Amino acid sequence: MKRKTLTIIFSLFGICQVFPQAAISFGTQELDFGIIPYNRPAEATLTFTNTGDKPLKIDRVSTSCGCTVADWPTSRVAPGKSGEITVTYDAKLMGHFFREMSVYCNAEPYMYNIALVGEVSNSKVDYTKSHPFKIGDLLLDTDELLFDDVEMGQNYEKHISIVNMGDEPYEPLLMLMPSYLSMSCEPAVLKHRQQGEIKVTLDGSKLKDVGLTQTSIYLSRFLGDKICDETNIEVSAFVLPDKSEVTEDDLLNAPQIFVSATQWTPDLSKHKSRYSKTIEIGNSGKSPLSIERLQVSNRVLSVALKKKVIAPGEFTKMKVSLNLKHVKRHRTARIYIVTNDPAHPKEVITVNL
């Protein structure tokens, strides 16, 4: 009789184990409001997902003080579906704040605590000096990414500091990214006047050509934004030649490049119709110097080279000219000289505009 009773108990226990249950998973355990202007109520959204196999019901949401109000969905959330809890902070107290929010639902353990953090400030930071580039309601510290001295097979990172000056939360997105570039942002969503960082990673294994590779990517200002000149961010990557097979004898008998100037700052205040500069390129090595590639970073510059092979002890002249139509769109321009000098396979001449 006892064995039969135990069998029934274990059978009932097994039935309870497979009984459908709701389960809740939150996008974060700490909801960050960022920096909020004093006395200006701010909203933040907490996303949750029903990861169980029974409809999820949020019974109520309570906050630790009257300064915070929550709004939640009253209908049940089906398994696998998501919902949002909107939290409003009244911002009537200055300084950093920490509050708690409790979510009561039909998913065990039935009560979940979420931290609410942020800062209320009446002083506005002037981001225009540190972030001089404006794209819609966004401020950036740069509008150009330069990946210099890239070796094939290696990964490289560049960062863009960004501030959201708009009233609505903003999720950074770079459009028309080529296969060798990828991006991430921390935080993923920027609130009003919140500063974040976009990380752009270059995969050197996907670049096959030695020399300069250029592309334009575009920062989306809002969901569904279109590509335009205002949102353009220029990306340049210079891939170095492979020097793994260069021997000591090669170095002893190699050509050696000499450039008379690596910087040029033309005085544009003179309003001349034409700006140009002549730069000498010489060879102080022991074998002929071959200029294998000559590239410019943008349409601001044009170059004319007299000869591409320079004997030891000789030099040639390169004329650099400015295209005034495109000067206003760029702060700098560069000339890249790729040679057979194994010690200095790349020489860069920078033009400051």
Image (cartoon, helix red, strand yellow):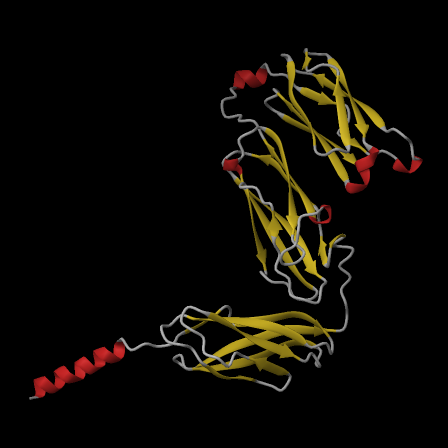
Q: Is residue 258 visible?
A: yes
Q: Residue at x 44, y 82 (%)?
A: 105
Q: Residue at x 73, y 59 (%)?
A: 137
Q: Is residue 353 visible?
A: no
Query: Looking at the image, which residue sits at the far bottom?
Result: 1
Q: Is residue 262 above or below residue 22?
A: above
Q: Is residue 183 above or below residue 99?
A: above
Where residue 113 sits in the image (x, y, percent)?
A: 49, 79
Q: Residue at x 68, y 45 (%)?
A: 233
Q: Is residue 72 above or below residue 166?
A: below
Where residue 341 sits in the image (x, y, percent)?
A: 62, 21
Quarter of the image holding residue 265? Answer: top right
Taking 19 as reference, is 26 left or right? Answer: right
Q: Nearer the viewer, residue 82 or 313?
A: 82
Taking 232 as reference, is 181 left or right? Answer: left
Query: Looking at the image, which residue sits at the far right?
Result: 270
Quarter of the image holding residue 251? Answer: top right
Where residue 195 sits in the image (x, y, percent)?
A: 67, 61
Q: Residue at x 77, y 30 (%)?
A: 301
